[in-house]
Amino acid sequence: MAVINTCVLGVGLSGLTFHVPFVLALPNVFALHSVLERNPRAEGGKVKERFGVTVKIHRSLDGVLADPDVELVIIGTPNDTHYDFAKAALNAGKHVLVDKPVTASVEQAKELGALAKLKGLVLYAFQNRRWDSDFLALKKLLAVPETSPHSLGAITEFESHFDRFRRGLKGTWKDQALPAAGLTYDLGSHLIDQALCLFGRPARITAFIQNLRGVGNPNVDDSFTIYMQYDAGTRNPYPLTVILRSHILSVRSPQIRYIVRGAGGTFTKFGIDMQEDQLKVISSPSAILEEQYGMEPESIWGTVEKIEADDTTVTRSRWPSSDAGAYMELFKNLGAAIRDGSELAVKWEEATAVVELIELAHRSSRDGVTVPVPA
């Protein structure tokens, strides 16, 4: 079966860290045909400089779209370009993988979905953190039967964090007040996507979104707290509150990741999936295939605290993140969808729902109200 000729748009952090290594690590599925790099600093560009691989360099999007050999376009450029670039690529007959947030508005996301369907092309959202080691461990825990000694019982509260400590601006496009700017569109895309995977659509959303530090453009948020409320029903006997947070001035190491409270126990997890840090420093894509890639150290495994039958005694046990993080699975699924028509692991409707909830969160925060979420 012919490999999928791929062009990666953008060779900054996103392209060189999250896309190029996986395309190179799956030579039986993809070929890194080219990249979009407008001003290469050195002969061969950044891909040659870092990975020792020579690829074609396009200087403009028009050049990419006119290249008949390019079958798949991966969009890892700034957020405000995602919609325009994806639409142009689909109209040029290319399959598309687009980084999150997929668009700045739900209307744009719906338009792209309809266009991909009309063209018979694969449109895939890069929600890679569905394959974080800690999220995989959490899904396993929530799936254990209630008779298991690790069962938390019916979940009443789910808290998910991406916190950090940074006093100043990064000095990148992320500091600019462009469409889809700010931390809610950035990290919030991951937290909302994970929550939707676990619990589905909420009934209501209440959000507090702000530029906490008061630096840079006041319209570019650097911290958020989002409450997603679920009514009691057949899926869960108790009302459920999902709390999604990203705090820019959080002093802790390792940072809190999850706190999950159930009627029978609590799960607490510190520290974050290792893949991003590993991908930032690898010089060869073969490192992704090594045994220790994506494995969490035991020091940041989660803890389950269970209440015993006397409703007083609490027992503690570790809940291992024993499955390695596996962003590779997203790319394998993408390749299978293009070549074999396999079902998408990340459906475009799910990515659209993430953008919808981000918009509702911004409305809630701006107006100071709780916003109902359409069924």
Image (cartoon, helix red, strand yellow):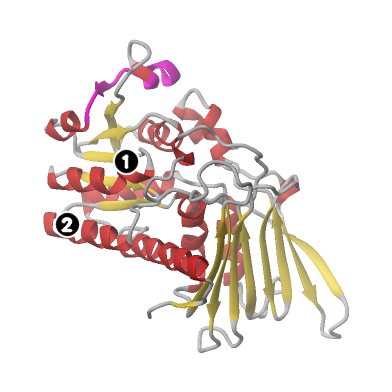
The N terminus lies in quadrant: top left
The C terminus lies in quadrant: bottom left
Q: Amino acid at mark 1?
A: Ile
Mark 1, residues whose alpha carbon is within 10 Å: few (<14), some, or many (≥20)?
A: many
Measured Cα–Cα span from mark 1 to mark 2: 17 Å
Mark 1 lies on a secondary structure that is strand
Give the extent of the magenta segment: 46-60
Q: Quadrant of residue 307?
A: bottom right
Q: Amino acid at mark 2?
A: Leu
- Give the residue pinned by disc 1: 75
- Give the residue pinned by disc 2: 115
Q: Position of residue 147 (x, y in %)?
A: 67, 80
Mark 2, residues whose alpha carbon is within 10 Å: few (<14), some, or many (≥20)?
A: some
Q: Nearer the viewer, residue 197 or 368?
A: 368
Name which residue lies at 46% across and 56% down. Answer: 189
Residue 203 belongs to the span the image colors magenta: no
Left-right relation of 334 to 212: left
Name which residue lies at 22% across and 28% down. Answer: 60
Circle number at residue 64: none
